[in-house]
Image (spheres, helix red, strand yellow):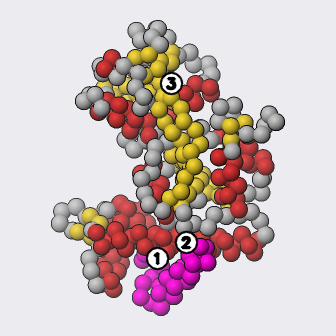
Amino acid sequence: MTFELSCLRSILLWGYVAGGMMELNSLKQFLVVARLEHLSRAADELHIAQPSLSRTIARLESELGTPLFDRSGRLRLNDTGKLFRDHVERALGELEAGRRAVAEATNGGLGTVRLASETFLTLTGPLAAYKRAHPSVEIELYWSPAEDMARRLRAQEVDLCVASQPLHAEGLESARLFDEAVEVVTTLDHPLAGRTSVTIDELADQPFITARKGHWLRGLLDRLFAARDLTPNIVCEGDEPSAIAELISAGLGIGLVPAFARRSATGVPAAWIAVDSPGCRRTVTVYWSADSHLSTAARLMRSTLTQWNWSSGEPQDARR
């Protein structure tokens, strides 16, 4: 879809909203309820009263002439609601993209870039290089689980997403950044520390320290064990990679750690052991919406990421 066609659809939606059929704010509130499928939590996030939010959703359904949610038991977005959600996300995203495109054109600058990722530890090198090359660009960083990335790209809440697991969604384009092994890390005095490799079966009773569900590392651990009809013995799960590493180094358990962290680990002696499974890897990929009009700043960020030498931690042409 061309940017001109996207803008036309946005203008038509704006005319529909401005004409009184639907309020823009009501559509935004609907998206929050659709995402959370819970009225009270949506009201808390939106900082409005739940009865007011309920009336907004009811009025929206009345204007459309059909329910958007199933209300038998827990609130669930129905098939009609999912269809409407997808159109609203794209349309509101295009309105935001149009606003940003106008701001970029009238200000004569590069614009801003909004990047979402599951972790930014991997991206510190290219982000620092990008900021040095383009000091006037405003960079907005958002932590996001992979399961939420496709929605954020469709809604144009962010320009780019970097994920360590595949995003299975239509309307996305991507470029692979790098692929690497994921290994088991233990303390130096652990019984497995002298091994060059270990099987999943041999790890069955080991205490694991890992990330929470939704994180790529946890997904990898669960998949590896499920393939052997096993369940990992998880003694601790958290959100902070540095805390996970510290707990492993303290001898409280073992964990899966990507090889990238091995190059940046300093001062923490540990044993790194290969996992005897071809699936114990991660592929890091940058995604963007095929329908979106990327700002100049976002296109430059995409180029920085795709042209980065991930092995040396430098730009591709740094040694030329």
Taking 216 as reference, is 31 above or below it? below
- Contact check, label 3 and label 1, Cβ < 8 Å: no
Q: Find the magenta span and give its range.
A: 1-28
Is 13 colored magenta in this rendering? Answer: yes
Label 3: few (<14), some (14–19) or many (≥20) C-alpha neighbours in 10 Å:
few
Mark 2–mark 1 distance (CA, rounded to whole Å): 26 Å
Taking 43 as reference, is 138 above or below it? above
Q: Nearer the viewer, residue 190 or 197?
A: 197
Residue pointed to by mark 1: 25
- Contact check, label 3 and label 2, Cβ < 8 Å: no
Mark 3–mark 2 distance (CA, rounded to whole Å): 48 Å
Looking at this view, name the residue that lies furthest to the left.
72
Question: Residue sitting at 58 percent across and 30 percent down?
Answer: 260
- Contact check, label 2 and label 1, Cβ < 8 Å: no
* Location of residue 201 in the rendering, given as x and y in whole percent from the top left corner: 31, 20
Q: Nearer the viewer, residue 184 or 75?
A: 184
Looking at this view, name the residue that lies furthest to the bottom.
19
Q: Amino acid at mark 3?
A: Glu
* Location of residue 297 in the rendering, given as x and y in whole percent from the top left corner: 70, 59
Q: Amino acid at mark 1?
A: Asn
Q: Give the left or right position of residue 9, taking residue 44 as reference.
A: right
Compare marks 3 and 1 and give the one earlier in the sequence.
1
**Helix, strand or loop at disc 2?**
loop
Majority secondary structure in the magenta region: helix
Q: Give the left or right position of residue 232, taking residue 26 as reference.
A: left
- Tell me, for residue 1, which label it has, or none: 2
**Helix, strand or loop at disc 1?**
helix
If the image is split into quadrants, where does the N terminus sit? bottom right
3 or 2: mark nearer the eye: 2
Question: Residue sitting at 68 percent across and 75 percent down?
Answer: 102
Compare marks 3 and 2 and give the one earlier in the sequence.
2
Residue pointed to by mark 3: 246
